[in-house]
Image (spheres, rainbow, N blue to C red):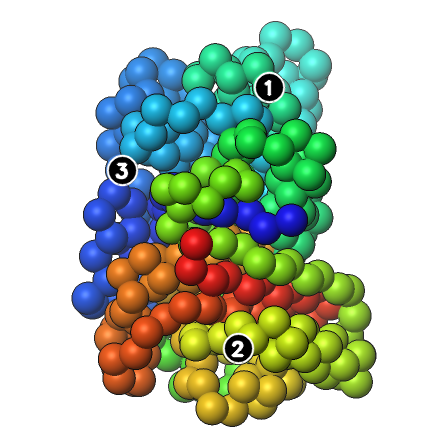
Amino acid sequence: MSLYIHHSSCISPQHTFGEPILDELIWYKNGISAIEPKYPAIPPRELRRMGKVVRMGLGTALDILEQTDTKPNGIIIGTGNGGMEHCVLFLKQITDYNEGVLTPGNFVQSTSNAIASSIGLATQNFGYNNTHVHEGLAFEMALIDAQLQLTSFPGRHYLVGGLDDMATYNNNIDNLAGWNRIPSGSTAELYSHKEIGTIPGEGAAMFLVSDEKEGATSKIVKIKTWYSDDPIDHTNQIENFKSYCDSKDIYPDVIISGKNGDVREDLFYQNFESQFEDRSPVYYKQMCGDYPTAGSFGLWLANYIMHVQKIPESITADSSPRRINSVLLYNSYHKFQHSLILLTKA
């Protein structure tokens, strides 16, 4: 089942919301933060009570709905850590107030499905509503969920999103586990230094998808996920996917790599890039940092490149003009979770 992308919206540390401006990148030092819009469509009283990840999710969803008259039949969200910060705040309140009178805001937003439910309530959408929390494969599982829904219910439309915020709790856990660089340093130097750890980031990317070609920007032809830290198995998985591309005559014109600057994961990205040596890889985590659903930003970028038929010069040295009919996106999270997404023109 192919997924057609009709509209997309992205909030990230770059100017991606609304009309994207990617001529020059914004570099961050010792911390990345998403550039949030003013959210004019969200009532201020409600906005004050929302956590950051809920704001970004609802903001991107409303942005898409402003672009179309189509009402989605369901909302599917993928998030690795969404809601965890408010869960910790609520548990802290229980201790601080000795299980007394507690404010409901943190409790309401203390679970990951608060994002999808907030979008559903705000848009009066009472259709299929699901949230996937699979760390580095959460967004890909949301896409596969949409595929399964459309297999059973052709002709429907779904909002599918991937989002995470860089909450203090999540960041501290990753620091203690050794996944982050301390100090994080500048995003401009993410790939220039061989170091252990990466620079954490955040963002939200939302897509309106269906199984209908009319009006679509691009088409997701194939999604592949696997869980392994075995380099041999990894190579076999990449080779099998490349064989699929060759058999369908959709060898990618552009490859997008989720390389994150962590030397412990370089081998997997090198395996991927070596399979397509005639293509210069496009990197994106210097733009958004690394987080469980960073692949959603990668897909937004792939869809944007397909739409404008140009790779922004700010993220590639290969500016040679050519027709872009297909893009292959690879992402890895913490060495174990891997995904490949093949995108073609609609």
Q: CA distance from mark 1 to mark 3?
A: 27 Å
What element does badge 1 sit on? loop
Whether residue 291 is visible, yes or no, is no
Q: How many marks?
A: 3
Q: Which amino acid type is marked by label 2?
A: Tyr
Q: Residues within 10 Å of mark 3 (few under 14, many from 20)?
A: some
Relative horizontal placement of residue 129, taking residue 255 as reference (left or right):
right
Residue 49 horizontal side relative to residue 267, left or right: left
Tag 1: residue type? Gly
Which quarter of the figure is the C terminus placed in? bottom left
Mark 3 element type: loop
Tag 1: Cα neighbours inside 10 Å, few (<14), some, or many (≥20)?
Answer: few
Give percent across and percent down for residue 36. 31, 41
Check residue 127 in the rendering and tell me which mark sits there, or answer none: 1
Residue 37: which disc?
3
In this figure, which residue is indicated by the disc labeled 2?
A: 251
Residue drawn 29% across the image and 45% down it: 17
Tell which of 54 and 141 is nearer to you: 141
